[in-house]
Image (tube, rainbow, N blue to C red):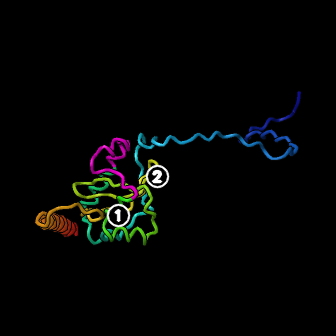
Amino acid sequence: MSNRRTSLSSSPPEAPRARATSHRGPPRRERSVVRPAVPEAWLDENPTWRVSRLDLRHPTRWEEHTPLMSLWQLLRTLRSFEDRTWRSILRDAQNHSWEGDEIEQWSAESRARLQQLRIDTGSRFYQLGIAGKGRLFGIREREVFAILWWDRDHVVYKTKRSKKSNKKHRANAKAVRDAAQAAELSKQRIKG
């Protein structure tokens, strides 16, 4: 009989040693087949958002002129767009592209701001309608919409209205803004 003791240890068994291999040159690269992109494939994709190009100073300074409720509406609308394809979104009349010479219809301030930001007017500009007259302007690259401006008061591209209609429209817009700001102030006072 053997007097050899068997020890029970908690350490795992040794892993087998890797064999030494001789170097036979660089490893083989896998071949990848580059398939051309289908030009219209993005239309069947859901949108994604990028904010790296977001300009907080144009058309108006966000922090000075955007009530919290307006931002909530913007976020809710963007969230609802994520459930739709680009094809579905662009069926709505206020959602469309701006191409080539159409940019000349934008306000002089907006065109100048594009130059200041060094954004090529040949980019794929799009607008998305948000809550009535509000528009979100951006640059689309495939399914990604890089948000550029939140145009709450429709000033990037001003539609043609009669002077009487414009005066009434500005008065209504100011009344809505004032009411939203008053509601926000009262909420802050209640919390404070």
User: Where, by quadrant of the figure, is residue 3 drawn?
Assistant: top right
Q: Quadrant location of the C terminus?
A: bottom left
Say if the magenta span includes residue 187.
no
Which comes sooner in the sequence, label 2 or label 1? 1
Amino acid on which the number 2 mark rests in the picture: Glu
For this orientation, the residue located farthest to the front is 101
Residue 62 seen:
no
**Residue at 41 percent of width and 42 percent of height:** 43
Q: Secondary structure at mark 1?
A: helix
Give the Cα distance between marks 2 and 1. 21 Å
Q: Is residue 75 above or below residue 22?
A: below
The residue under label 2 is: 141
Label 1 packing within 10 angstroms: few (<14), some (14-19), many (20+): some
Q: Is residue 84 above or below residue 188?
A: above
What residue is disc 1 on? 104
Cβ–Cβ below 8 Å for labels 2 and 1?
no
Q: Which residues are magenta?
A: 79-100
